[in-house]
Structures are given as C-alpha cells and as structure tokens.
Image (spheres, rainbow, N blue to C red):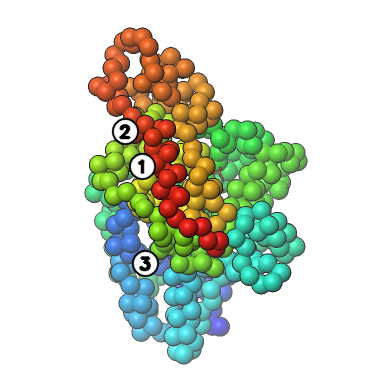
Amino acid sequence: MNKKTTGVVWLREDFRTTKNDALIYASKNHENICALYIYKKKEFQNRSAQRWWLFQSLKNFQNKLDKVNISLEVIESESYKEVFEKILKKENFSIYWNRIYEPQFLSFDQKISNSLKSKNINFKIFKGNLLNEAHEIKKNDSTPFKVFTPFWKTAEKFYLDKGFQRSEKIKPKNKKIKFLSQSIKLETILPEKKWSKKFEKLWTPSEDEAIKNIKKFIKNELSDYGKNRDIPGINGTSKISPYLAFGQIHVETIWEECQAIQNKSQGYRKYINELGWREFSHSLINYFPEMLKGNLRKDFDKFPWEVNTKHLKIWKKGMTGYPIVDAGMRELHETGWMHNRVRMITASFLVKHLRIHWKEGEKFFRNCLLDFNEANNVAGWQWVAGCGADAAPYFRIFNPILQGEKFDPSGEYVKKWVPELINLPKEFIHKPWELDKDIKNFELGTSYPKPIVNHVVARNAALAAFQKIKKISI
Ligand SMILES: Cc1cc2nc3c(=O)[nH]c(=O)nc-3n(C[C@H](O)[C@H](O)[C@H](O)COP(=O)(O)OP(=O)(O)OC[C@H]3O[C@@H](n4cnc5c(N)ncnc54)[C@H](O)[C@@H]3O)c2cc1C
C-alpha cells in the first residue's frame, strides 16, 4: 500500500478514537485521511430521538477529528451502493471500516468487498463493537446457542482465551483533505419536533463523556449494581447504552475498565453478565435473522393479538392508570431512555394486559430510545412477549402493582414521572384506585386516569389467548 494514497474511513456506529481499528489503521498507514458518514434519512425517520443523538455525535466527533487534522464528510443518501458508485470513480485511495453485527450490514460488506476486489481497490474491514465476532460462538456441535447461560459461559471464556488488548492510538495528520466534498448541513438531521431539546440538559453524546461516565459508574456504583440495578428510583445502572449504540465507547473498553478494579464484587459479576446479554442478542439476530421480522418461536405466529389503536395510544402517552407503567413511558418521553426493569414492565403490560403485538412496542421504542439497537430491542421485546430465545414464559405475567411495590417501594420513581400522584401515601402510590380518603388536588379519573383494564380480567384474557396457540420448540 502506498502511504501517499488517501485513506478513507467509513464511519457508521463508531464515533470514537479509542479502539476504532479502521480509523487508527488508516491514520498509521496514510499521510492523508478523510472520514465519511453516510446519512440515510429514511432509516432515521422512525428513530426520532436518535436523530438528535446522531446530530450531536457528528458535531462533537467532527470537533475531535479537527484536532488531528482529519475532516469528517457527511453525505446524505438512501443507498450505500449509490455512494460507493461515486467512491469507486475516485482514484488513489484505500477504504476501511468496522463491522456492524446486523445481517443487512454484514451482507452489504460481502457484496461491496467483491466490487472492491474486482477493481483492485485496497480495503480492510475490522472487528466491530462486540467482544467476540457475532458468528464465533457456537455449541460443540456447531449449532448456535438459544439459551443465555451456556452461551455466555462459552463466549466469556472464548474472549478471555484470546487475551489480547489493543491500545494503539490515532496518529495525528499534518493537513486536512477533502474526498467527496458533498457534506450536508448537520442541522438537517435534527428532528422537527422540539421534544428532543429536553435531551440537551441530560446527555452529552461524545467519547469523552462516555469514558468519564463509565469510570464514575465503576468507581461509585458497580459494587452495589447487583442490588441497585432493579430499582428505577436510584441511579443504579451505568446509562452507557446510547454511547454503546453509537460507538462512542467500545465494549472492550468497558470490559477493561471493569477488570482494573481490585474488588470483583457480585455487582461486577452481574454487570459483566449484562454485557453478555448484549453479545447474546447480537449472536441471535445473526444466526436467526428471521427474528428481525417476526416471532422467533413460530407458534406465536398464531397468537390472537388485539388491534386497539385507542389502547396503544394511551400506553404510549403513559396514561394507562397503572402508575409504574405510566412513569416508565413518561421517563422515556422526557429523557429518551427508560430503566431496564421498567422496560420489562411496560413491555409486558402492552403485550399481555393489552395483548397488543410486540412489534408495535418495538416500533415505538425504536422511535423514542436514544439507545435503540436493532439486536437488543428486538430480543428484549421477544423476551418479554415469550416468543424469543430463552424468553420469559408468556404465562408469567408481571403484576404492575406488585412490580411497583417491590421495585419502587417508596414510590419515588413514580412521583418523579407522574407528579399527579405526588401527594398520595406510599401504600396507595401503585394502586391509587384503592385510596379510601380525600387527598388534596387528587381525584381519580380527573387528575389521574382510572386503570384502562382490570389486572385480573386482563391476566385471565391473556392466559386464555395463550392457550389458543400450540407450543413448539425453536
Ligand atoms: C423491551 C426491551 C427493549 C430494549 N431495547 C433496547 C435497545 O433498543 N437498546 C439497548 O441497548 N438495550 C435495550 N434493552 C436492554 C436494556 O433495557 C438496556 O440495555 C439497558 O436498560 C440500558 O441501560 P444501562 O446502560 O444503564 O444498562 P446497564 O444495566 O448499566 O448495563 C450495561 C450494558 O449492558 C447491556 N445490557 C443490559 N441489559 C441488557 C439486556 N437486557 N439485553 C441486552 N443488553 C443489555 C447494555 O448494552 C447496557 O448498556 C431493552 C430491554 C427491553 C426489556
């Protein structure tokens, strides 16, 4: 390879300089490099919250790359192929990128590799943001795992056995160059709705912030993560998910930061396991790509889902009359993030109490979550619905009252997001309809809705619907 040729780095979900193999390799092997981001507007139409995160990420990363004399061009196109056709018309360049572990991305990598090879263009595709490559972990008989615990036992050992650590740093360049010179104005990426403005006070989408946050979490919260991770009213989890989704941090960096601590507490073990669930989801969607479109367990194709736009709208708005459900949905709207325990409760309420198809919830989360990730979202929804791998059985139906009382006993979380209930005594905070005395400024049905469904009736209807489908194993 000739160092004088331009090194082009195709950025996707990797807005970082640490453990960004494609970027670091290009900076070491070329005198001049340019980073490209291809913005697919249509793809982000249903990911409104992430348009805000993407805009901020591009802006912050552009500033960071500026300091090492690398320009970042943002090209708008609905088709990677179309942009590559333009790239292929250029001369004297090499191109690099990191993998994204989703079937459509991996299949594009394969196709474009063939074109680049046929045109004798130098290119290299590097490992992406997982501990292991998505297809590396298999059972002894070469079939994929469908159960988390044995998957993770094998995957963790596999990763540890590799035992490598990459600590190379990006090499600054002497001058900035342009490559396609067709950059769009970043502001066009921002969602039209002003609700994303609220995120500005809560999040800073940059690599520096990701590293700062994870270090702080490990120092202050990790040891108690085991017991605190289920309590939505406290800051018990790392909130690193949006940074992982956009690659402001590599999961190996999180892993290494965790390994560096002296006292490997139960909290440490639990946290590492959660990173394992992320690996598992990515493994699943790559071995079973059909689950991106429908139920992994085919018996669920016959499930008698309800089509009820009124109920769906009420759920989205956080007006179901079940405080813990409504608090979760409002946290999502206000912050672009929702606590994992409450994701399970709200999702379960939609698919079991309301019997609305999990795909509706998946779509809504995709639009509202800053950390939306194809693998984790679809696996999360199918886990809750009971139609995924190693899923919660459909007949185990979360009781939103008991879940609230167990995980938000003082009602702090509910009061934060559902301020209508602020004056309620804690014994009624998760079941305001049982209130037996007058409370100032509170009237059920006026200041806060009555429950849209009765828990017992809804539970029985869900179980009856479940009886209608024949069980087959995946
Ligand atoms: C219905 C539903 C939808 C979900 N959609 C998404 C999504 O779109 N994007 C997303 O990143 N996560 C999703 N999750 C998983 C989980 O809720 C979030 O990863 C977690 O809440 C993020 O917060 P955190 O970074 O503080 O997590 P922490 O508890 O601090 O965990 C650290 C990291 O481990 C990973 N992780 C934790 N729990 C899970 C899990 N159950 N499955 C997979 N990875 C996990 C995440 O990368 C997370 O950032 C979903 C879960 C459910 C039940």
Q: Is residue 277 above or below residue 175?
A: above
Around disc 3, counting alpha carbons within 10 Å, would you say few (fewer than 14), some (14 to 19), or many (20 or more)? Answer: some
- Tell me the residue at 51%/57% (across/down): 471
Check if mark 2's residue and mark 1's residue have beta carbons within 8 Å: yes
For the point 44% across and 70% down, the residue is 104
Label 3 residue SS: strand
Amino acid on which the number 3 mark rests in the picture: Ile
Bin the neighbour count of mark 1 within 10 Å (Cα to Cα): few under 14, some 14-19, many 20 and up. Answer: many
Closer to the camera in the image, 415 or 263: 415
The numbered mark, 2 or 1, whose residue comes first in the sequence reads 1
Position in image of residue 6 (x %, y %): 46, 76
**Callout 2: few (<14), some (14-19), or many (20+) C-alpha neighbours within 10 Å?**
some
Q: Position of residue 443 (x, y in %)?
A: 28, 17
- Mark 1 to mark 3: distance in Å? 39 Å
Dot placed on the residue nearer the N-terminal end, 1 or 3: 3
Residue type beneath disc 1: Leu
Query: Which mark, by number, is residue 452?
Result: 2
Left or right: 339, with 159 as reference point: left
What is the CA distance from the residue labelled 2 to the residue labelled 1? 9 Å
User: Which quadrant: the N terminus?
Assistant: bottom right
Q: To which residue does mark 1 refer?
A: 354
Image spot of residue 30 (x, y percent)? 53, 74
Mark 3 vs 2: CB contact within 8 A: no
Camera-side residue of 359 and 307: 307
Q: As displayed, is residue 456 above or below residue 111?
A: above
Name the one closer to the observer, 312 or 317: 312
Q: In the drawing, what numbered circle is on residue 38?
A: 3
User: As drawn, is 154 to the left or to the right of 51?
Assistant: right
Q: Which residue is at 46% across, 28% downward? A: 401
Image quarter (top left, top right, bottom left or bottom right) of the C terminus: bottom right
In-front residue for pair 323/155: 323
Q: Secondary structure at mark 2?
A: loop
